[in-house]
Image (cartoon, rainbow, N blue to C red):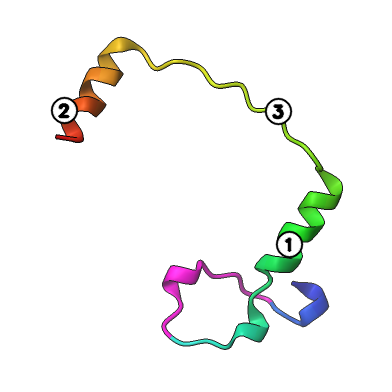
Amino acid sequence: MQERGANLLLDRGAVVYGTGNFDITPVAVQRLDQRMPSVKVQLTALPSSMQAQLAQQRR
């Protein structure tokens, strides 16, 4: 952000109008990929009560 002279960061959904040259997403992703080429994610199962609740919401 400092490289581009920005002092405010907004979620894309909060922007009504903007130009593409202020979007730092591609640069941020590229730099994260360089610093963290892989990330280990360990998934755990949801408790059965939460699984049932999610199943009801999807109906």
Q: Is residue 27 found left or right of 51 in the rendered image?
A: right
Label disc, if present, on residue 16 of the rendered structure: none
Q: Is mark 2 on a helix, strand or loop?
A: helix
Q: Are marks 2 and 3 in contact (CB under 8 Å)?
A: no
- To which quarter of the image does residue 45 belong? top left
Query: Could you tell me which secondary element the residue under label 3 belongs to?
Result: loop
- Marks 1/2: CA distance? 38 Å
Q: Quadrant of residue 47?
A: top left
Marked residue nearer the N-terminal end (2 or 3): 3
Distance CA(mark 3)–CA(mark 1): 20 Å
- Decide: few, some or many residues near mark 2? Use Cα within 10 Å; few <14, some 14-19, many ≥20: few
> Which part of the image, by quadrant, shows the N terminus?
bottom right
Judge the density around disc 3: few (<14), some (14-19), many (≥20) Cα neighbours within 10 Å: few
The CA span between labels 2 and 3 is 31 Å
**5 with respect to 57 (left or right):** right
Amino acid type of the residue tagged 1 in the rendering: Ala
Nearer-N-terminus badge (1/2): 1
Residue under label 2 = 56
Q: Would you call the spot at circle 1 few (<14 residues within 10 Å), some (14-19), or many (20 or more)?
A: few
Q: Which amino acid does label 3 sit on?
A: Lys
Labels 3, 1: front one: 3
Q: Is mark 1 on a helix, strand or loop?
A: helix
Earlier in the chain: of badge 3 and badge 1, it is 1
Circles 1 and 2: CB atoms closer than 8 Å: no
Residue at 16 percent across and 28 percent down: it is 56
- The amino acid sitting under disc 2 is Gln
User: Which image quarter holds the C terminus?
Assistant: top left
Q: Which residue is disc 3 drawn over?
A: 40
Q: What stretch is highlighted in magenta?
A: 7-16
Whether the magenta-drawn stretch holds residue 41 is answered as no
| Image spot of residue 4 (x, y percent) | 77, 80
Marker disc for residue 28: 1
